[in-house]
Image (tube, rainbow, N blue to C red):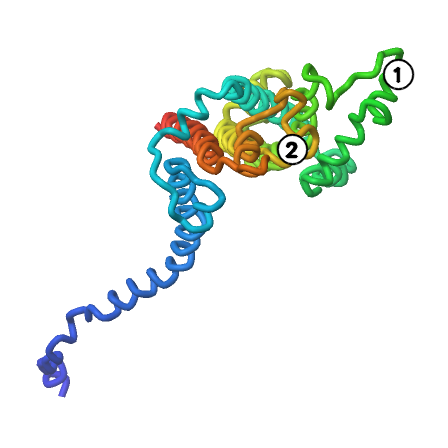
Amino acid sequence: MAHDVMTRVPAPAPAGAGARSPRPRKSGSWAAWAFLAPIVIYLLAFYAYPLYRNLDLSLRHYTVRSFVQGDAPFSGLDNYRIVFDDAAFGPALLHTLAFTFVSIAFQFVIGLALAVFFAQNFRLSGTLRALFLVPWLLPLIVSASTWSWMLNSDSGIVNHALGLVGVDPVNWLTSPDWALTSVIIANIWIGIPFNLVVLYSGLQAIPAEVYEAAAIDGANSWQRFWRVTFPLLRPVSAITLLLGLVYTLKVFDLIWIMTKGGPADASTTFATWSYRFSFGSLLPEFGPGAAVGNLLIIMALFFGLLYIRFQKRLDS
């Protein structure tokens, strides 16, 4: 009986039983495309198509009639020539760069300092961090209106405080010398919480053992920050700076509410200039407005490519 069991030949497997059926792979592929379809449709509808329309606007001579009827003649690079030849191009470019880089520098430095401060986990640390988020949570129209009131030349609280220490009132919003500085100060205040949150999260990811080893080696507080914290925080710092830069490049509502780009174009940036071209007069110039918007996109792409190259260098 045992011999029969041991010498029993197994029945041949049905044909095709050992081969994998292609149907599950095909159905899995369809399922993957089904999951990807919503994001692909979203990207095409809200990113690719608007970019195409903006590029088309910048290459045609649009009027209100042709914008509605869709029969605008092709004008090539004429709209870009109009923008480059405009006397406001140079000041707008300088204001855009100054507004962006000064805001980013102060937002990052102050946000990093606050992140390091709150990383000590002292009493009421969580409560104070939550209070620092308030400027970030407020709608921009509320923040801009509040700063407009605070910096008002006649009744603003800032000039009132300066008067208490014997300083003459400053025309923050109506002087060409101070208008750009005023919107930069307001934008710094709005952007600090974002830097604080992201950098604080990055600090929490640094192992405590690294600091303990540095302390054993005799490193003081500044040396621990400069040689341990800052290098390990570089990837988080890079993405924080990139996101802040792209966001700041396109800031419009804050500047428009506070100064409308004035006085005398003293606080005009590419974002407000593009809006003024397209909607700031009874005879809108959609083509030049779109051209200025495309210049902003090119600037953002340039800094994005710089970030990618920097990130590859860090990973290598």
Tell me the amino acid under the disc marked 2.
Answer: Trp
Q: Quadrant of residue 153?
A: top right
Q: Earlier in the sequence, mark 2 or mark 1?
A: 1
**Residue at x-position 61% and y-position 32%:** 195
Quarter of the N terminus within the rendering: bottom left
Which circle, 2 or 1, is nearer the viewer? 2
Residue 311 rendering spot, x and y as whole percentages: 40, 29
Dots 2 and 1: beta carbons under 8 Å?
no
Query: Which numbered disc covers residue 308?
Result: none
**Residue at x-position 45% and y-position 25%:** 83
* Residue for badge 2: 256
Quarter of the C terminus within the rendering: top left
Q: Residues within 10 Å of mark 2 (few under 14, many from 20)?
A: many
Tell me the amino acid under the disc marked 1.
Answer: Gly
Residue 216 visible to the viewer: no
* Most foreground residue, 128 or 292: 292
Looking at the picture, does residue 213 appear above or below residue 203? Answer: above
